[in-house]
Amino acid sequence: MSYANRKEMGSNRTVAIIIVALIHVGLGYVLVSGLAYNVVKQAAEDLKTFDVEDEPPPPPEEPPPPPEDSPLPPPPQVSAPPPLVRTITQAPMIQTTPNIQPVIITPRADPVPPRPPAPPPPRPDQSARAKGSLPGLFSSDDYPPGALRNEEQGTTAVSLAISADGRVSGCNVTSSSGSTALDTTTCSILKRRARFTPARDTSGTATTGTSSARIKWVLPDN
């Protein structure tokens, strides 16, 4: 078979297929259209119109009988709301670390030793001696007038401080005669009248010293 004949046969087959397809489409449309018409017609026959009558209103209901007297229920108790509890939140404690400054130790100079005490004055090698009798310095004219009137008498013992020039620089009553006037007069006369050879130290220099005396006061005869 030549190429032209085969080409012609292929074209005829294609045309035949298209025609068959159109026939099927047409048959399907007829079937669908007929079925739809029958369904609509059947639904129109089943649909019947009728008038809807309104139902009469129901008779009015009789009011209910008044309720019998019954005790009123107690009013509901109103309970007070619970008190509000305020919780105090404490602020967190902040621990601070103290800033410790380093201790600077400054070297201290050694203290200056104290100066040695001054040597004590040389002890006298020779004590002070009175020039004459000390009781001989007193007479009846020295008797205190108050002691005479009160008829006071007795012995006064004294301790004397002798200066380097041999004079009495101090008088201290070590034993009283019992009369203040007699004791005072004793020291007063010794300071004014008594003279001493001053005490001397080991080098022979005059220095201070001490001495003692006892003066007996006796009322003079009339």
Image (spheres, grey):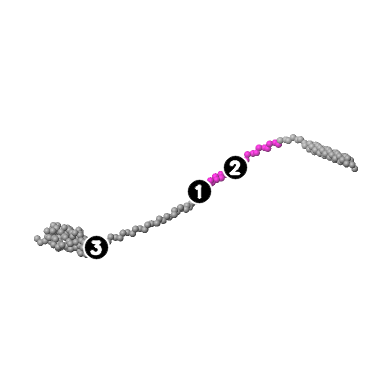
Q: What stretch is highlighted in magenta?
A: 55-79
Find out whether the residues at labels 2 and 1 contact each other: C-beta distance under 8 Å: no
Quarter of the image with the C terminus in it: bottom left
C-alpha gap between disc 3 and disc 2:
141 Å
C-alpha gap between disc 3 and disc 1:
93 Å
Regarding mark 2 in the picture, which secondary structure is present there?
A: loop
> Compared to 138, does 81 lie above or below?
above
Q: Which residue lies furthest to the front in this view?
A: 203
Decide which of 27, 54 is in the foreground and name it: 27
Identity, as a three-letter code, of the amino acid under mark 2: Pro
Q: Name the residue under label 3.
A: 122
Q: Name the residue under label 1.
A: 86
Decide which of 206, 55 is in the foreground and name it: 206
Q: Mark 2 points at which residue?
A: 67
Among numbered discs 2 and 1, the one appearing first in the sequence: 2
Q: Which residue is drawn at 75% across and 35% down?
A: 50
In the image, 83: left or right of 36? left
Identity, as a three-letter code, of the amino acid under mark 1: Arg
Residue 172, quarter of the rendered image: bottom left
Residue 59, quarter of the rendered image: top right
Question: Is residue 74 shown to the viewer in this render?
Answer: no
Mark 3 neighbour class, 10 Å CA radius: few under 14, some 14 to 19, many 20 or more: few
Identity, as a three-letter code, of the amino acid under mark 3: Pro
In the image, 171: left or right of 84? left
